[in-house]
Amino acid sequence: MITEKFKSAILKELKLDEFEIKDETLANSIPGWDSLNHINVILAIEKEFSVKFKSIEVLKCKNVGDLQKLVDLKLNK
Amino acid sequence: MMGIDISKIYSQFIHDKQDSSRTFQWAYDNSFFFFIFIGLLLFLFLAQKDRRLRWALLTGFSFYFYYKAIGYLPYVLLISTIVNYGLGKVLIKDYKDVLKKAALIFGVVFNVGALGYYKYTNFLFSAFANFKGQEYTPLAIIIPMGISYFSFKALSYLFDIYYGSLEKEYSFSDFLLYMVFFPSVMQGPIDKSRDFLPQIDNDYHLDREGAAKGIFLIMSGLIKKVVIADYLRFFLVERVMESPDRFTGVEILIAIYGYAIYIYCNFSGFTDMGIGIAQLMGFKLTDNFNFPYKAKSVAEFWRRWHMSLSSWLQEYLFVPLQMSMRTLRLMGNVLAVFITFVICGVWHGASWNFIIWGALHAFFMAFALAIKKPKENFYKLIRIDRLVKTKAWGVLQVIFTFHLICFTWIVFSIPDLKIIPYGIQMTNNFTFYINIPDSVVMHQMYDQMTMFFKANVFWQFIAAYPMIMVLLVSAFVLHYIPASVYTKAEYYFSKLPIVVQAQVLTLVIWIVTQSRFADSPPPIYFNF
């Protein structure tokens, strides 16, 4: 499940007021989340939740839901 | 009594040793190919529900296709298939992460190593000898056909397993078909394993729309490759590029535009035919071109040009690189762009022109990236931030980007580009040397463009070579009309009665054979 905190971190980084984000949403379907901006979004999420991803963990994510799960996993450790 | 010479018919089926240039001719612009391809389609239709028989037909024909082109079996491709499948097995199994990582690294070293050995050994040794001022006799290394493509396909298979993008495990025979699949073995597109492999499971089914789409692609490919590209290459591009000092600035400028159209029509025409042929066999290959000269930036150009290569590079090289350097932020992106595009240049061939071409693209993109924010602020400051969102501004961006790309094509197309030490006299007894690219052809082009540019030559050129101008102008018009025109044309074509479709196809083939001249040059991307 996409949490509010997670969603607002993404929206804030992409300077979006509102955009519906679901588990199956693909990163590149969100306005502004392109291949060059990708690292900024990842860094923003890392900062917001004070977590650190391994590259391979992010590369394995297929959609935004997978990224949320990754954050949850890190926080529950 | 009329006799039939069986040996002549037989000779059509075997590899033609006499004429090595036939290697390139054995492709989709060959009537004999279409004759046996239709036979293959009939058999596929008969085997539509039998997966094993279908596999045997496709794989067998792909091997035959390879043999007919080069005269022997693709043993390097076979070894690569066996090794990569073995590595894939290690990656799929529940082994420790360390072992999986080791298998992936070995796979990268193996595939890049094989590619490097066949394509770059001579280049590296000669660059080294050059550096030491020695002569170098190239080793006789024969580059296996399609190695740049099948090595990248194999790597995509390993990465897809490693990243968990493949839904299930595929058999060796399926992987073999993926590697050797004939419509894409020569010049791509580079299909990702996760896009191609699942399609092997599908029953063969060809509906009217699918058939019309395939035929439409083959027709457009034939026209692009044989009518437009071959003609422009033979009568314009090659003549001017060979000795630019014999032409005036206007002619060189036309040849530069001609090269942009030629390289696009040559390459995209060839892959259109491959995609169309695969479509008729029930396979959807990755799209490779989307009107690249409509791009408003160099980065967008790469989302429209050789898309299967650029998306491969983005997914398996650029994103991992950028992710590992993400703490460097902008600098990380810039570095990742540079590394990716220099490698993209190297992939195209072992010579300086390709490497500098890749670096130029990297430079344009990195520069755009670095000035993105200051540029937006500047537009606001001088209050043109609304203007830059208008269509007219977009048109200017398209024209500007097209000319940047044309400039990179000049570098790309020049075979005599060398890296030479250039001395700068600092003081009386100290000279500072830097290595700069140098090319006689480029010097000549520059001289003629700056010193002999007479606009009225343009009208003389049109009068003297009307066919070149007709082809050039129609190619540009066909490129810049809305893409929806093609979708509509395809739709209406699919609604035509089959007899009329056959008539149209016959007409296109007739035009192609009429405009074809004796020595059709090899498709350019074949050599990569």
Image (spheres, coloured by chain):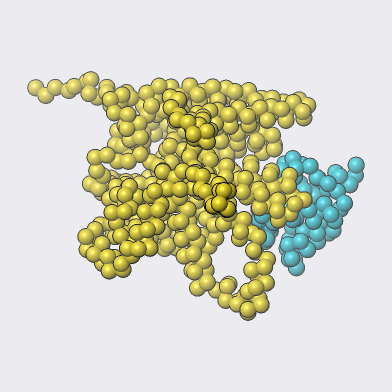
Residue B190 in view of the camera: no
- Relative depth, front residue between B280 and B478: B478
Q: Furthest residue to the front?
A: B428
Where residue B55 sits: x, y (%)?
A: 49, 27
- Dividing the picture into quadrants, the one containing residue B159 is top right
Q: Is residue B424 above or below residue B47?
A: below
Where residue A20 sits: x, y (%)?
A: 73, 61
Q: Is residue B22 above or below residue B311?
A: above
Residue B381 in view of the camera: yes
Q: Is residue B520 left or right of residue B399?
A: left
Q: Residue at x 18, y 22 (%)?
A: B5
Classify the position of the N terminus of chain B by image quarter: top left
Q: Residue at x 42, y 62 (%)?
A: B480
Where residue B167 sits: x, y (%)?
A: 66, 36
Q: Residue at x 53, y 40 (%)?
A: B346
Where residue B151 sits: x, y (%)?
A: 55, 32
- Relative depth, front residue between A3 and B11: B11
- Relative depth, front residue between B280 and B208: B280
Q: Which chain is cyan?
A: A
Q: Which chain is yellow?
A: B
